[in-house]
Image: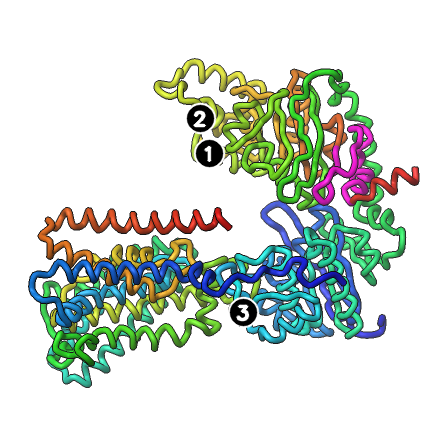
Amino acid sequence: MTDSVPLLEARDIAKSYGAVQALRSADLVVEPGEVHALLGANGAGKSTLVKVLTGVISPDRGTFAINGNPVRIGSPAQAARNGLAPVFQDPALVPDLTIAQNMRLTGASPAAVERELRALDLAVDFSEQARDVPLPMLRMIDLARALARDPQLLLLDEITAALPSDLAERVFTVMRASRERGRSVLFITHRLKEVIASCDRATILRDGGAVATIVPEEGGEETIVEYMLGPEAAQAVVAAVDKDAGDVRATPAATGVTPALEVIDLSMGRVRGVSFSLRPGEILGVAALEGQGQDDLFAVLSGQQSPASGEVRAGGKMLKARHPYDAIRAGVVLVPADRLQALLPQRSVRENIAAPRYNSVRRWGPINVRDEGRRVREAEEALQIDTRAARQVRRLSGGNQQKVTIARWLANGFATMLCFDPTRGIDVGTKRQIYALLRRLADDGAAILFFSSELAEFPLVCDRVLALFGGEVTAELAGAAADEASLLRAMHGLAAEAEAVA
Amino acid sequence: MTSTTAVAVERRGGLARFVRRHGWTVGIYVLLFALTLFWRSQTTVKWGPFDVQSLVIDALPLCFAACAQSIVIISGGIDLSVGSMMSLANVVSAKYMLHMSFDEAILFSLAVVAGAAFVGAITGLTIVVTRVADIIVTLAMLFVLGGLALAVLQVPGGGAPVRFQGLVSVDTVLTQWFPAALLILFGSFAVLWLTVRRTRPGLALYAAGSNRSAAYLAGVNVKRSRVLAYAYSGAFAALGGLAFTAASGLGDPNAGGIYTLNSVAAAVLGGVSLLGGVGGLIGPIAAAFVLTLVKTLMILRGVDQNYAQVIQGALIVLVVMVGGLAIRQKGKGS
């Protein structure tokens, strides 16, 4: 295999989004007739590399060769002509067209696709509109369409996420069959067990570059995690925790108080039977890989979605939120990752902070300007918001915008704050201010639920950390013990084995 | 391996599905039929083929305008320049056809349609290249084309060969109940639309309006589809302008003005979703007849012109609202 020309050779791929370098210099080599896994933690550049390979975005730098011939991949259509067939996490089927029309749209023969589906042991009504077909089935149809082209390289992007296990099993069968026919598969997943069971080789990305290409072996999860993490990084994190533990973290609040937020057997979307309780004065972390149900969990708690089953209690009282307004009234407020989702970008800092004050009808009518001004000023001072560009919130830096979102709730009162990745895209200095601020809020009796995509934040901020995997809480760690390595294991659902070993 | 039916889609009855997918179109035809019966009961002189012929001629420009607008909306855009394009096609044809023979006039008409399609394509190209919103680019085109129409013909005038006008007159019929104007409408519909509707470019048009990113990821050239939609819009709008020339025997630079918003009304009433990807041309054509018939009925009953507009507006909102509620109710049921 090593003597042959590689099927796909991507060299020195780089891509930046503004100041953020998603890919520094990534290499990927896929040999003919192999199942190759692409792995990496959140933000390692995995999804960017997939988008570049499939022509969805064009890289800033880098070269591709297929069977040794240099090619350009400028669009998904061009990728298809080069023998790459991607199956994305969001199926590329147009909702208003029937399945048969969708097939003809891309020049796939419905008969060939139907044959592939039959091989997968699936029956599909091709005259059904795509919008009426359940998502897992759409993914399988998308897969069958890709297979019908008999591609040299099948690219499966997180296809097994949220697929029922019997369908996931059929995907693995397809991967094995492709290999036997000398075709290759590039398999992107978070599930390390699948990699070890089905992949011949794995390329691991870290910080926008490929750090290693390995042959996955039985029991090799730890090795993979180590590569994903980087040994130096692990050391550095531990050091940082030791240093910061003293100044930022305080002792957890006493037990025996009414929980500020209690979640009992909650299910909605990807969330499956999650229970936890959050005391006043406590910061509870939620650690999860992309798409493990954290979005749904926060959407339910903040009142944007109704739960399918289970209950939420706020301050001991049942919370049935039909609207964020209900949650806010019960003292449960949200600080989202995307600041502009919460703020009115064209309006002033003052208006933004004061906005939720005028929710209730009795507040309508003339605004008490002096009272509003006082409260806003207090909040601004407490948070050290840089108000030089206060006339339009969109002119503030991301960090200051996030402070405005927090200040809003500070000025209006709350009991539980839901922070969903609050430091996304914020500079290190402001991040530290926000950690300290959250801790101060907790010390004053606030309860805080904290999700972050940066693992290093958990030990700095949280008293306890829950790991969410496949919509379930798979582990609970003490804040101090939540170093990056243990978190990463727990987030991959490997906690049980790790504990068994220890 | 587990059973096939684990997540297989449950099959629904053919009729139920037909109603679900085409219920709106069927509904609008039922409405048209009911209005026709009402119309018949309201006329004092005996109602007959002549009434049908004049209704068709009256509705013809709006039918074409509705087609023009619907195609763009289906592809995910909106075209505010439909009316101006009709005016331009109308004055250009009226000005130059005046002294032509019939054959020359037909050839000239085809050239006008092709030219309008080209201008439409340029509009579409401007939208996809500059990424300026559809509504802004086509609003600009509304002024540009409207201005050109005035430059061609300042005041109503011009004309067309008698035989050309005869194409859509009450005297030309296939059978007593089937006016030639209807044949022209169905003919252009079949030639321009049915030929692409089920082909890849036609499906791509729906795909671009339904979910642009899914279409892109599936390898559809979304930009090309959108340009195609605007080219179609230009061609249909030009047909509307030519229909106006034939019906009135006159070029009027302001003739198209009312058609821009009426075409949106007909599209929506005809079951085209403003969000794109949903609908066809058969519904909007019926809706164009409904809107014309409502106007006729109002005149017949001697309703004040101004109130007639109020009633027409209220009717559009009412029908769309009731239809929307019906759909939502059904969604809750299933």
- Of mark 3 and mark 1, the one earlier in the sequence is 3
Residue labelled with disc 2: A351
Q: Is residue A273 above or below residue B246?
A: above
| Closer to the camera in the image, A475 or A411 | A475
How much space separates mark 1 and mark 2, taking CA atoms? 8 Å
The residue pinned by badge 3 equals: A100
Give the answer, above or below, for where A300 lies relative to B203: above
| Amino acid of disc 2 | Glu
> Neighbour class for label 1 at 10 Å: few (<14), some, many (≥20)?
some
In front here: A260 or B116?
A260
- Hey, what amino acid is under mark 3? Ala
Q: Secondary structure at mark 1?
A: loop
Q: Position of residue A105 (x, y in %)?
A: 52, 69
In percent of the image, x 29 and y 69: which residue is there?
A: B236
| Mark 1, residue position | A344
Q: Decide whether residue A482 is among the magenta residues.
A: yes
